[in-house]
Image: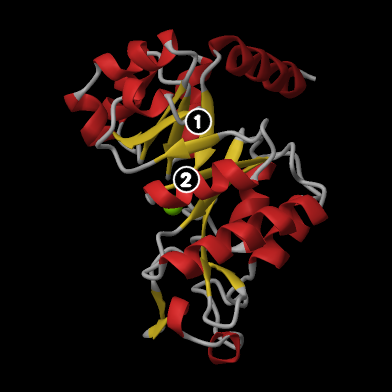
Amino acid sequence: MKKILLLLLTAIALTASGQEVICHRGYWDTEGSAQNSIRSLVKADSINAWGSEFDVWMTADGVLVVNHDETFNGVTIETAKWKQLKNMRLANGEPLPTLDQMLECGKKLQTRLILEMKPHTSREQEKEAAKKIVKMVKKKGLQDRIEYITFSYQGMKNLKEMAPESTPIYYLNGELSPSQLAELDVAGIDYSIKVMREHPQWIDEAHSLGMKVNVWTVNSDRDMDWCINYGVDFITTNAPELLQLKLAQ
Ligand code: MG
């Protein structure tokens, strides 16, 4: 009973703060998990993280693959065929996931899906990737649970054009002020802690423009406290349970 009450109070405190936790590459720094694995998405959901982030590439033959680096086991994803990758395994033993598998799993969970589309070398291929991503998300009925983030300026514009009006899209690259981004009508900025410490005024600037602020990758006590005190809306971290505890205090 005591435990239930504590959980309830934690949930209320988390909601009241208005600041949300996003697991960076899923909740991977925990037993049985791995970065960008299906398990990391399930783990993020199991701790009631607001969102779980993962990275997406497209192979040369059009398969959307979840992985952070441009290569996996020495194979460059964007120039490879899926058959070169499909038998490969992550550090936790599960197969290298496709976006299809990731979204299929996401359908059964509550956590929001923060999909990072990686900048591809070929503009055409990246545009095709954006098109396929948006189409797949629609087919899975996940349009209300997805948010897009990307370092690619062109990719952001493509996603903005293709996704439903209500889909939040954030820019990662860090060189544009919120005012400079405002004309693109995106949801906000999703910048590194380093960039944000250099431009703390961008937080109020974004808010005054009706935009939100996400900061990554916030792992230390010091950086977490900074984000909480400055009113950052979404904090992307490798240590989600520590951040949840801080937000509940
Ligand atoms: Mg990412």
Side (left or right) of 105 relative to 81: right
SS for dot 1: loop
**Total numbered labels:** 2
Label 2: which residue? 156
The tag on residue 90 is none
Name the quarter where the N terminus is drawn. Answer: top right
Depth check: give the residue in front, 55 or 36. 55
Q: Position of residue 144 (x, y in %)?
A: 74, 36
Q: Percent x, y for residue 128? A: 57, 65
183 left or right of 168? left
User: Within 8 Å of ligand 1, the CB of disc 1?
Assistant: no
Which image quadrant is residue 102 in? Answer: bottom right
Q: Tell me which amino acid carries mark 1.
A: Val
Q: Do residues under tags 2 and 1 come within 8 Å of each other at their CB atoms?
A: yes
The residue identified by callout 1 is 186
Disc 2 residue type (three-letter)? Met
Picture residue at 74% right of the left edge, 42% below the top: 143
| Above or below 165: residue 32 | below
Task: Report x, y in % for residue 125.
Answer: 49, 70
Task: Residue 32: tell me if it is visible.
Answer: no
